Image (cartoon, rainbow, N blue to C red):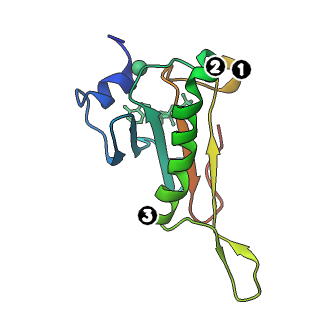
Amino acid sequence: MDNCLFCKIAAKQIPAAVVYEDEELLAFKDINPAAPVHLLIIPKQHIATLSDCDGSHVAILGKMLALAPRLAEEHGISVVYDAAGAPTRGYKTLINSGPDGGQVVYHMHMHMYGGPRPWRGMH
Ligand code: 5GP
Ligand code: ZN
């Protein structure tokens, strides 16, 4: 897509703090972080919203979701269990879809928020 911000980031026409890349996915730091760790995971392929996805997108959606725990590990926000077996740390994954969903950039992306709370407003 010619005028899509995240397509331009995927094509390296606009710089971003990239934390992961493979043939199909890119992950980078959000430019305006709402939490100590705030990453965005995108498909390199332009998909405007989650509502544009169907069964043919199961693999790419699965890859996006499966990347989250790996990035969590690398950024120190994985869920770890304390001596009593209680979960600690952790993160939020979020896909905003459409105006009522709070989507601003129309290239589908999954937010990943983590780090010690409180966090600034969640969108
Ligand atoms: P949305 O509301 O569409 O789900 O979230 C879009 C996100 O993209 C926002 O959190 C915003 O801070 C982030 N963002 C907008 N423009 C840029 C940019 O040029 N670079 C990066 N790294 N993040 C951006
Ligand atoms: Zn795009």
Residue 33 lies, in percent from the top left, at 48, 47
Q: SS class of the residue under badge 1?
A: helix
> Disc 1 or 3, which lies upstream in sequence?
3
Whether the residues at callouts 3 and 2 have beta carbons within 8 Å, the answer is no
Write the residue at 55% across / 48% down.
66
Instruction: Please name which of the two marks, 1 or 3, marks the residue nearer to the observer.
Output: 3
87 vs 89, left or right, is: right
Amino acid marked by disc 2 = Asp
Q: Which mark is residue 116?
A: none
Write the residue at 45% across / 42% down.
32
Amino acid marked by disc 3 = Glu
Quarter of the figure with the C terminus: top right
**Above-or-below relation of 71 to 85:** above
**Residue under pointer 2:** 54
**Above-or-below relation of 92 to 14:** below
Whether the residues at callouts 2 and 1 have beta carbons within 8 Å, the answer is no
Q: Which mark is residue 74?
A: 3
Q: SS class of the residue under badge 2?
A: loop
3D distance between C-alphas at marks 2 and 1? 20 Å
Quarter of the figure with the N terminus: top left
103 vs 106, left or right, is: right
> Disc 2 or 1, which lies upstream in sequence?
2
24 vs 48, left or right, is: left
